[in-house]
Image (cartoon, rainbow, N blue to C red):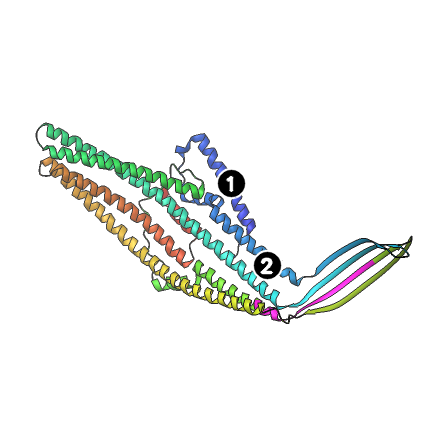
């Protein structure tokens, strides 16, 4: 995995331009003239969402750690300057003025511990990159979920309002029939009770819509009063490849949480090497040049010196510290290994659940589509029977409620199918912006 900060900067500029353009359009034509789509929300969320920003900066921080550790193996140049006044109080008082300039150079020739720490820092970069990639996938899922939640809530509001209007008509009919003595007062009271319940449900649905809009605003900063709707011809496609074991194998190789834990295990193994390396010597090449100037009783004396050598440092005894740190690193590695095993099982489970979820969602959408047709036909028959005097208004209300519930269930099943597909690809580590674009092509104003 690779990442370019320059590319992300250019993307951020594009997002800012889109935001300015969108704001200008809303100013000129009014917010009601613009319905945001899924890609607009996602592009703005990339620049607005605090979670993805934090992950990106964590990745940058890890990148800076590599040159910091590598610097140990590069030349170290130091300049020192010293000026001092020395006064000897004796029988013959003397005062000295000393000026010293020194330039020191050191070069590491062998440092086993720093080598292991450099290896660990490189692993840390790969781990931070995987964590950022996982954060991007999580952002895609959160944006898609928040956007589709708005569509769900809007559908529920529409259905609840339609149901309220239908029940209101039935209530009026029941009242007129009661006035002419065709039905009992029970039908009127039942219709009124159904109407009152529908009013309450419409209030709940409207509040849920505002909650869904607020959730999207937290992620992207978008005040989505209008969003593009999912077209009725959105295709239902089985997973490709259409085999659960293929998805399991893919998840075992590229599931991002699994990759992160696997890299964490590698980092723990490198930490053991770094702690053990403390027992080995450190060898450095050292060189220095100095100039000394001394003033005494108006007389100047100067001297220059230079030296070069090889310095070797070997720890003999550290009070058991090294043994304790090695044992601690080994325990951390065993803990990371256990986490890896648990994450491997979780990745397999996510792949299997995701595959079954997509297949089940397809079957559910088709079944609910047929159920919608059947309930509508049943409602039409009941209403015809009501007009003929063979069915009661209560039966009509129940049939209408079944129709609206079937509509809501069908809409929710379509959204569930999209999210199930995203979760399956997330489990396999392949979810990306292209998947959002594929859905966005089927959004209409």
Location of the C terminus by quadrant is top left
In the rendered image, the vertical position of residue 117 relative to residue 94, given as above or below: below
Query: Which residue is painted at 48% across and 46% down in the image?
Result: 50
Mark pair 2, 1: CA separation: 32 Å
Disc 2 versus disc 1: nearer the observer: 2
Residue named by callout 1? 16
Q: Which region is colored magenta? A: 275-291
Using the image, determine if residue 365 lies above or below residue 167: below
Q: Position of residue 110 (x, y in %)?
A: 66, 68
Pinpoint residue 378: horizontal percent, then vertical percent: 16, 43
Circles 2 and 1 in contact, beta carbons < 8 Å = no
Residue drawn at x 55%, y 56% is 62
Task: Give the SS element for disc 2.
Answer: helix
**Residue 271 in view:** yes
Left or right: residue 311 compared with residue 339:
right
Among the 4 quarters of the image, the one containing residue 160: top left
Residue sitting nearer the eye, 101 or 28: 101
Q: Residue furthest front?
A: 91
- The residue carrying mark 2 is 66
Q: What residue sits 21% from the left and 48% below the top?
A: 371
Q: Residue 200's x, y, as percent? A: 26, 36
Q: Of residues 334 and 228, which is closer to you in this image?
A: 334
Q: On residue 285, which mark appears? A: none
């Amino acid at each position: 995995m690779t990442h370019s900060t320059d590319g992300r900067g250019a993307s951020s500029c594009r997002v800012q331009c889109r935001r300015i353009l969108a704001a200008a359009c809303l100013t000129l034509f009014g917010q009601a003239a613009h319905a945001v789509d899924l890609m607009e929300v996602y592009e703005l969320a990339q620049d607005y969402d605090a979670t993805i920003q934090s992950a990106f900066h964590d990745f940058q921080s890890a990148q800076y750690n590599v040159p910091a550790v590598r610097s140990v193996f590069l030349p170290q140049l130091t300049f020192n300057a010293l000026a001092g006044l020395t006064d000897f109080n004796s029988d013959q008082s003397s005062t000295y003025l000393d000026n010293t300039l020194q330039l020191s150079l050191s070069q590491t020739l062998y440092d086993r511990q720093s080598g292991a720490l450099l290896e660990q820092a490189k692993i840390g970069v790969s781990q931070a990159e995987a964590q950022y990639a996982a954060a991007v996938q999580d952002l895609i899922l959160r944006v898609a979920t928040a956007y589709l939640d708005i569509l769900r809530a809007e559908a529920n509001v529409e259905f609840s309002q339609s149901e309220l209007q239908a029940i209101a008509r039935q209530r009026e009919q029941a009242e007129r029939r009661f006035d002419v003595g065709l039905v009992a007062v029970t039908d009127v009271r039942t219709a009124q009770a159904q109407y009152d319940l529908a009013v309450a449900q419409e209030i709940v649905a409207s509040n849920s819509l505002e909650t869904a809009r607020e959730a999207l605003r937290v992620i992207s900063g978008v005040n989505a009063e209008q969003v593009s709707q999912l077209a009725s011809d959105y295709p239902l496609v089985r997973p490709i490849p259409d085999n659960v074991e293929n998805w399991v194998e893919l998840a075992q190789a590229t599931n991002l949480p699994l990759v992160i834990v696997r890299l964490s295990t590698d980092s723990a193994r490198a930490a053991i090497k770094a702690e053990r390396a403390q027992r080995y010597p450190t060898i450095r090449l050292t060189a220095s040049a100095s100039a000394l100037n001394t003033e005494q009783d108006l007389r100047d004396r100067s001297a220059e010196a230079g030296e070069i050598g090889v310095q070797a440092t070997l720890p003999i005894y550290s009070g058991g510290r090294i043994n304790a740190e090695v044992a601690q690193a080994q325990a951390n590695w065993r803990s990371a290994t256990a986490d890896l095993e648990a994450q491997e099982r979780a990745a397999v489970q996510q792949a299997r659940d995701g595959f079954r979820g997509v297949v089940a969602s397809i079957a559910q959408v088709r079944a609910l589509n047929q159920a919608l047709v059947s309930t509508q036909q049943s409602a039409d028959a009941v209403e015809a029977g009501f007009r003929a005097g063979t069915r009661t208004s209560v039966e009509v209300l129940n049939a209408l409620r079944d129709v609206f519930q079937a509509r809501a269930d069908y809409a929710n099943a379509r959204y569930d199918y999209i999210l199930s597909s995203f979760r399956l690809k997330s489990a396999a580590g392949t979810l990306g912006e292209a998947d959002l674009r594929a859905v966005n092509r089927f959004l209409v104003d």
